[in-house]
Amino acid sequence: MRLLRELSRRKLRTALTITGITIGIWALVVFSSMANKINDLVGQGAEFYNDKIIVTDGEAFGTSPMRLVAADAIAKLEGVGAVDPQVQLLWAADGSGANFAVPNMVIGLIPGADAGYESFELELATGRALTTQDGGNVVVLGSSLAQEHGVVAGDSVEIRGESFDVLGTLQPTLTSPDTNGLVPLATAQQLYLDELPPLVAEAVVASDLVNQIVVFPEAGADIEAIAAEIETTVANSATMTGLQFDENIGATTMIFNAIIIGVAAISLVVGGLSVINTMAMSVAERTREIGIKRAIGGSRGRIIREVVAEAGVIGMIGGLIGLGLGAIVVVLANEAGRASGTVLFDLTPMTAAFAVGFSTILGMLAGVVPAWSAARLDPVSALRYE
C-alpha cells in the first residue's frame, strides 16, 4: 500500500510512465506471438520434409510439368525406398489465396505410394482417407480447409468450379497438410492439364503429367547424395531436402524474428527511459523526506530498495496492462482469420510470463540510477533542501 501511495502522488506522471511501458509490452506480446506461430510452422515444416526429397522441374520449382517416367527412373536409383509422384495445384484456378499465408493447395497422389516410409502421420478428424480404389471428384481436406469451408466427411466442396465429395477431414498439423486437399492423382492430372497453355496441353496426355515427385530414401541412406544423383539422372530437375529446407527457411525465420523483436525492444527502451525520468523527478521531490529517513537511521540499502521497488511496481503494472491488451489483439485477430484458416498468432504461457517479468525487471533496472542518487544524498544537505 505504501508503494501505491507514493506512486499516486503524481498521478498523471505515473500514468504516462505506465503507458510507455504498456505500449512496449503490448508490442512485445503481439510480435512475439506472431514469431511463435511462425516458428511452429517452420518447425513442423522441417519435420514434414525431414525424411524425404522433393523433386521438381528446375526451371520453376513445383510449377512446371514433368513426365511421370521420371518417377520410374528415380525409383531405380540405389538408396531410394519409394517414390510418390504428385500433382500440386492452387486451390483456386484464378490464383487467389496465394498471399502471405500458406496457400490452399490441391494435391493429387497415389495412396500408399510412400510404401510405409512416410514418418509424418496424418490423423483423421472425420471420415476416411483416400484409397487406391477411389477415383473421380473426391477429396480429403486438411483441417484449415475443412474449417474454412465448414465441411466434414459426407459433405461436398467446390474446387476449381467442380463439386467434390468430402471423404474425410484431417486433424491439425500446424504445417502444409492443413491447407491441402488430397485427391486421386488421375483427378489432379486432368485439372492440371486443363490449366496448361493450349500448345503444351496438346502435346501431352493427362496420365503422363506430374509436377512434383516425393522421394523416400531407404533407412541409413545418404539423403544429400541421393538428391545429387537425382539431379544428374533426371534432366532439368531440382531437389529440396530437409537440410536445405532448414537452411533456407530457418535463416529467413531468424531474420524475421530479430526484426519483430527489435521493434518491440525499441518500444521497451523508450518505456525504460521514461521510468528513469519519473523516478529521478520523484527522488528530487522527496529529497527532504529521504534526508529525514537517513537522519533517523535509515540505511542507504533501504533507500535503494524503496526506490527500486517503486520502479519495479511501475514496470509490473505496465506489463500486466500491456499483456492484457496484447492478448485481446491476439484473440481478436485469430478469431477474425479463423474462418479463412489464417491464424497468425500463438500467445504461449512462456511469452506471457516473460513479458510481465521483463517489464518488472526493466522497471527495477531503470530505478537503480535514481535509487543510487537518493542513497548518496547527504542527510544534512537533504534536510536543508527547499
Image: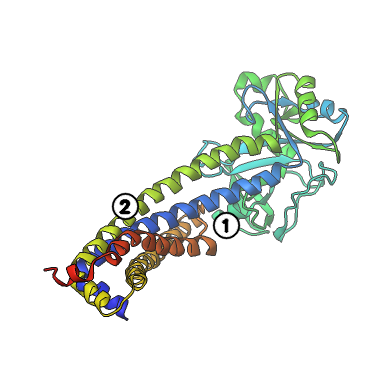
Q: Is residue 361 left or right of residue 341?
A: left
Q: Quadrant of the C terminus?
A: bottom left
Where does residue 348 sit, x and y in percent of width and height?
53, 61
Q: Is residue 211 left or right of residue 133?
A: left
Sequence-first disc among 1 and 2: 1
Question: Mark 1 sits on what residue?
Answer: 147
Could you tell me which residue is drawn at 34 percent across and 68 percent down?
Answer: 304
Where does residue 30 sit, x and y in percent of width and height?
43, 55
Vertical placement of 160 versus 341: above or below?
above
Vertical placement of 98 versus 362: above or below?
above
Name which quarter of the figure residue 308 lies in: bottom left
Where does residue 73 sit, x and y in percent of width and height?
83, 25
Q: Quadrant of the N terminus?
A: bottom left
Q: Nearer the viewer, mark 1 or mark 2?
A: 2
Question: Mark 2 sits on what residue?
Answer: 270
- Mark 1: amino acid: Gln
User: In the depicted view, which residue is nearer to us: 242 or 6?
Assistant: 6
What secondary structure is marked by label 2? helix
What secondary structure is marked by label 1? helix
Asked whether residue 4 is in view, the answer is yes
Question: In whole angstroms, how far apart are the C-alphas of marks 1 and 2?
Answer: 42 Å
Q: Is residue 96 left or right of residue 372?
A: right
User: In the depicted view, which residue is nearer to us: 363 or 102?
Assistant: 363
Q: How many marks?
A: 2
Q: Residues within 10 Å of mark 1 (few under 14, many from 20)?
A: some
Could you tell me which residue is drawn at 57 percent across and 49 percent down?
Answer: 39
Q: Going by the picture, which residue comes out furthest to the left?
A: 386
